[in-house]
Image (tube, grey):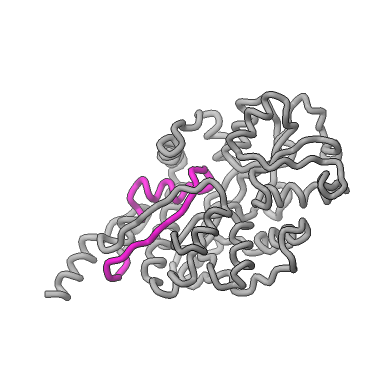
Amino acid sequence: MRRLATILLVVLGITGCGREPSKPASTAAGVIRVGYFPNLTHAQALAGLARGDFANALGPSVKIESTVFNAGPSVIEAIFAKRIDLAYVGPNPAINGYVQSQGKALRIVAGAMSGGAALVVRSDAGIAAPEQLDGKRIASPQLGNTQDVALRSFIAKQGLKPRENGGTVQIIPTPNAQIIDLVKTGQLDGAWVPEPYVSRLVVEAGCRVLVDERDLWPNGDFVTAHIIVSTEYLEAHPDIVRAWINAHVMVTQWLRENPDEAKRVVNAEIGKLTGKPLSDEVLNAAWSRMRPTWNPLEASLVECANAAYNAGFLRAKPDLTGIYDLTLLHDNPVGSQQD
């Protein structure tokens, strides 16, 4: 009877999206606690949870408990505190969590998004070239976050330094939602932000893109978001993580192959979570700057780590050996492809 019940659960749970259905995780009753942001760069989490793709892949024996975050460091704190098991997060928080825990706390198991970040400036701020950032007030979403590090690395290559380091560029860490109003009122000259805030600043505040970060990377690819898993959870429940990754790959394919429907689903979720969906103009512009992927883009992560070290956010040059565990991703026939 016990074997029969297991067989029935597996058969009944085989549903999913994409080209082939995903089999539910063959696991005892359990829970996976998932963290993500209400951002376009976390499109797989938004769409996959809304459509039920992850629930179908995991099956009825696994409960999904999701938590919405607004900042990467908060995700890492939750991983450390064992409040979440899996999360969509940017590269620098993952690096910091790995380094702070001496390589014990987490592993990157798949990529999620490439692109979708830029340096945007006010049209009347007198910034027509990067060297004209001298003396300007530029925001980043949070001290030490992915865009903050990218901004500091970029100005260093222009021969400039932040004001706190004896330079002339005033870098002002500011929550994304506040940046738009501060730019509109002239209190900020620009910002290095992720989507959809790049497009919102262009559409709503009359800004222009000075630097599209894709132009700074080979083939325009760099990691904006990927999936991390608590090392403890990964070791205890590889079957659940495998099912999640398989669904993630299929949702990524669906996002690419059905962009109009994908934008509608993702934007509806953003509206539910934030109280306001994006305008069509913002949504379309932002979507055009991003590429959903399962490729972890390891080389760009190494560059992010070196930039964080050069900016003074890491005490020693980081050794990221072991930060990736891509075994389950590469077991997937599609996920094994370099995308």
Image quarter hosting the C terminus: bottom right
Q: Which corner quadrant of the image does residue 118 belong to?
A: top right
Inspect this view and state whether residue 256 appears. Answer: no
Residue 185's spot in the image, x, y percent? 69, 24
Residue, far left: 1
Instruction: Find residue 62 and report its horizontal and vertical position in percent.
Output: 30, 62
Query: Does the segment drawn in magenta span residue 22?
Result: no
Q: Quadrant of residue 322?
A: bottom right
In the rendered structure, the answer to whether residue 303 lies left or right of residue 114 reads right
In the picture shown, does residue 70 fall above or below 20? above
Q: Is residue 159 above or below residue 231?
A: above
Locate the N terminus by quadrant: bottom left
Across and down, in percent, residue 28 comes to: 27, 70
Most foreground residue, 100 or 322: 100
State which region is magenta.
Answer: 25-54
x 32%, y 67%: residue: 25
Asked whether the viewer can see residue 147, the reply is yes
Residue in view at x 67 percent, y 29 percent: 182
User: Is 292 displayed left or right of 85 in the figure?
Assistant: right
Residue depicted at x 43% and y 39%: 273
Between 244 and 181, the one lying in front of the other is 181
Specify the farthest residue to the front: 81
Left/right of residue 287 with respect to residue 331 in the rendered view: right
> Number of labelled discs?
0
Whether residue 143 is situated above or below residue 107 in the rendered picture: above
Question: In the image, what residue occupies the spot 81% across and 32% down?
Answer: 127
Find out whether residue 34 is within the magenta segment.
Answer: yes
Whole-percent x, y for residue 214 in the image:
68, 47
